Image (cartoon, grey):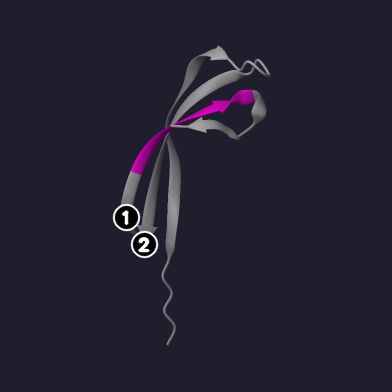
Amino acid sequence: MCLVFVCGEDERVVSRQPAPGACPYCRGMIQAMDVESQWNFCFLPLYSKTKRRVFIGSLGSAPLRST
């Protein structure tokens, strides 16, 4: 008998807004994104949290900081 439990985390962008100012290092555009993450266990939602993440456009998809 084999039991398989499927656990995981789903993330989706809820909203995206341009933040004022520019990156002091590369002068790239700053964007503030609200990201909702949800932990699942056997396809049942267990935990949900919304975070604001700050991204710099010229640095790609690497977050600057997460609050």
Q: Residue furthest top?
A: 21
Q: Is residue 57 left or right of residue 31?
A: right
Q: What residue lies at 44% left-to-right and 83% top-to-bottom?
A: 2
Which residue was labeled with disc 2?
41
Quickly name the residue at label 1. Answer: 45
Identify the residue at image location x=44%, y=41%: 12
| Number of other residues with Cα within 10 Å of mark 1, as a class: few under 14, some 14 to 19, many 20 or more | some
Q: Main secondary structure of the magenta part?
A: strand
Segment colored magenta? 49-57
In the image, is residue 43 part of the stretch drawn in magenta? no
Q: Position of residue 67 (x, y in %)?
A: 43, 32
For image coordinates 55% across by 20% down, the residue present is 30
In the depicted structure, whether residue 46 falls above or below residue 11: below
Q: Quadrant of residue 49?
A: top left
Residue 50 within the segment the image draws in magenta: yes
Mark 2 closeness class: few <14, some 14–19, many ≥20 residues within 10 Å: few
Q: Position of residue 1 (x, y in %)?
A: 42, 88
Q: Position of residue 31 (x, y in %)?
A: 52, 23
Q: Please tell me whether residue 39 is drawn above or below residue 34 in the rendered image.
A: below
Question: Which amino acid type is shown beneath numbered disc 2?
Answer: Phe
Which structural element holds mark 1?
Answer: strand
| Picture quadrant where residue 46 is located | bottom left
Residue 53 in the image: state x and y as whole percent: 47, 31
Q: Nearer the viewer, residue 49 or 6?
A: 49
What amino acid type should be assigned to the residue bearing mark 1?
Pro
Helix, strand or loop under label 2: strand
Q: Nearer the viewer, residue 26 or 31?
A: 26
**Residue drawn at point x = 65 percent, y = 15 percent:** 27
